[in-house]
């Protein structure tokens, strides 16, 4: 973080005084809200208005050269998805996917990344005709469009999910620094109660997606390498955030979402994970952060997850 910003934040002064100094330094109101008020944009906006009325600066004032750039949440990250489900023969589903223009193959159980979608077995699933549909490497908006087409086929084939099914998202982590890794792990840990609230009970803590609250935050903060972090997680891939995926795929895996064939649910969770990563490149959320104050979500995303929370309450 910029040294001037750090010095301001460390001063023993009121929040209002810190906000004023940071705004004069050239930071945006959103950045100041994230740094000082745990995302409370309205508080910062009120201080900003009073500064304008007092003539401290005008809206045309050039941004200071020391300003931190706005975070760009454009979704262009590479990702992969694993859809666990049942109620459709793998060969029939493969046939329908090919007719929809999706390159897919039925294979034996494996963890290999393919250039095509693959349908494999998974012994952890219950139900008739169980399967796991694994994507190739997808990217950004084009990847979401392809996923939507796959979901249309799943719906046509009457594919179902139950409590044994999960939805796993792999996000490209090749560009992560150790600071990004630490920020991501701590942010997820701090947001765990919020995320749990919009996930089914079966995905809040089970054998295949264990809680992050059980992992020492001090060990996460002290980690100097990804190997240190993996050891803090017990080298166990069955956590909501799976760091073991990095060794094999150079990805981080988000394992918590419940099984679904619904594209809207998938898209919102994929964007949530991608935005969390983008935010982690610059910082972490504070403990006790509410859904309304998550800095990397749009207003529409907050509404979506708020409604999911109410539905699952």
Image (cartoon, grey):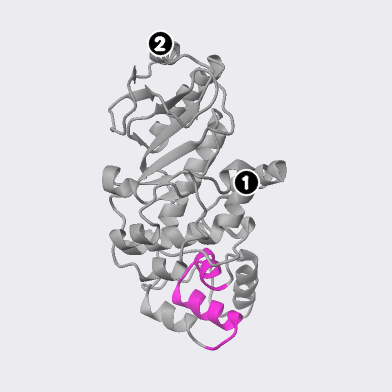
Residue 70 shows in the view:
no
Q: Is the magenta stretch mostly helix, strand or loop?
A: helix
Q: What number is the disc on residue 198?
A: 1
- Compared across the picture, whether 304 is left or right of 138 comes to right
Point out residue 6 in the picture as x, y percentages from the top left corner. Answer: 42, 79
Q: Residue at position x 62%, y 55% from top?
A: 291
Give residue 178's position: percent from left, percent from top: 32, 62
Question: Pointer 2: what residue?
Answer: 95
Q: Residue 149, how many percent across, how many down?
A: 46, 22
Mark 1 secondary-structure assignment: loop
Q: In which quarter of the image is the N terminus?
A: bottom left
Q: Quadrant of the rendered structure where residue 55 is? A: bottom right
Q: On the picture, is 130 further left or further right than 54?
A: left
Q: Residues within 10 Å of mark 2 (few under 14, many from 20)?
A: some
Q: Which residue is drawn at 56% across and 56% down?
A: 192
Q: Up-down: is 53 above or below 130? A: below
Asked if the residue under mark 2 is in contact with the one under mark 1, i.e. CB atoms within 8 Å, the reply is no
Whether residue 13 is in magenta: the answer is: yes
Q: Nearer the viewer, residue 227 or 174?
A: 227
What residue do we see at 51% from left, 71% from top? 35
Question: Which span is picked out in magenta?
Answer: 12-36
How far from the left and from the top, in percent, is residue 127? 55, 22
Instruction: Of the two numbered discs 1 and 2 on the same chain, state the one appearing first in sequence.
Output: 2
* Residue 270 shown left or right of residue 78 in the figure: right
Residue 59 vs residue 11, the one in the foreground: 11
């Amino acid at each position: 973080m910029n040294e001037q910003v750090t010095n301001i934040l460390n001063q023993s002064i009121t929040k209002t005084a810190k906000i004023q100094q940071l705004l004069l330094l050239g930071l945006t109101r959103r950045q100041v809200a994230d740094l000082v008020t745990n995302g409370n944009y309205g508080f910062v906006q009120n201080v900003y208005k009073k500064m304008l009325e007092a003539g401290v600066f005008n809206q045309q004032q050039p941004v200071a050269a020391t300003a931190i750039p706005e975070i760009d949440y454009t979704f262009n990250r590479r990702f992969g998805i694993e859809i666990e489900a049942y109620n459709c023969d793998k060969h029939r589903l493969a046939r329908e996917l090919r007719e929809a223009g999706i390159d897919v193959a039925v294979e034996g159980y494996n963890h290999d990344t393919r250039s095509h979608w693959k349908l494999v077995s998974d012994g952890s699933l219950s139900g008739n005709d169980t399967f796991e549909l694994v994507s190739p490497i997808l990217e950004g908006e084009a990847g979401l469009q392809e996923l939507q087409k796959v979901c249309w086929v799943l719906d046509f084939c009457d594919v179902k999910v139950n409590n044994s099914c999960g939805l796993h998202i792999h996000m490209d982590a090749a560009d992560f620094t150790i600071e990004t890794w630490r920020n991501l792990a701590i942010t997820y840990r701090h947001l765990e109660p919020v995320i749990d609230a919009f996930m089914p009970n079966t995905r809040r803590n089970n054998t295949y997606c264990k809680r992050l609250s059980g992992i020492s935050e001090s060990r996460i903060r002290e980690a100097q390498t990804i190997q240190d972090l993996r050891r803090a997680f017990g080298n166990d891939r069955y956590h909501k955030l799976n760091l073991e995926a990095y060794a094999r795929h150079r990805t981080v895996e988000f394992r918590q979402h419940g099984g679904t064939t619904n594209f809207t649910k998938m898209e919102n969770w994929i964007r949530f994970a991608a935005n969390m990563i983008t935010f982690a490149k610059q910082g972490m959320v504070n403990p006790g952060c509410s859904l309304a104050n998550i800095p990397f979500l749009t207003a529409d995303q907050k509404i979506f997850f708020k409604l999911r929370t109410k539905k699952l309450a």
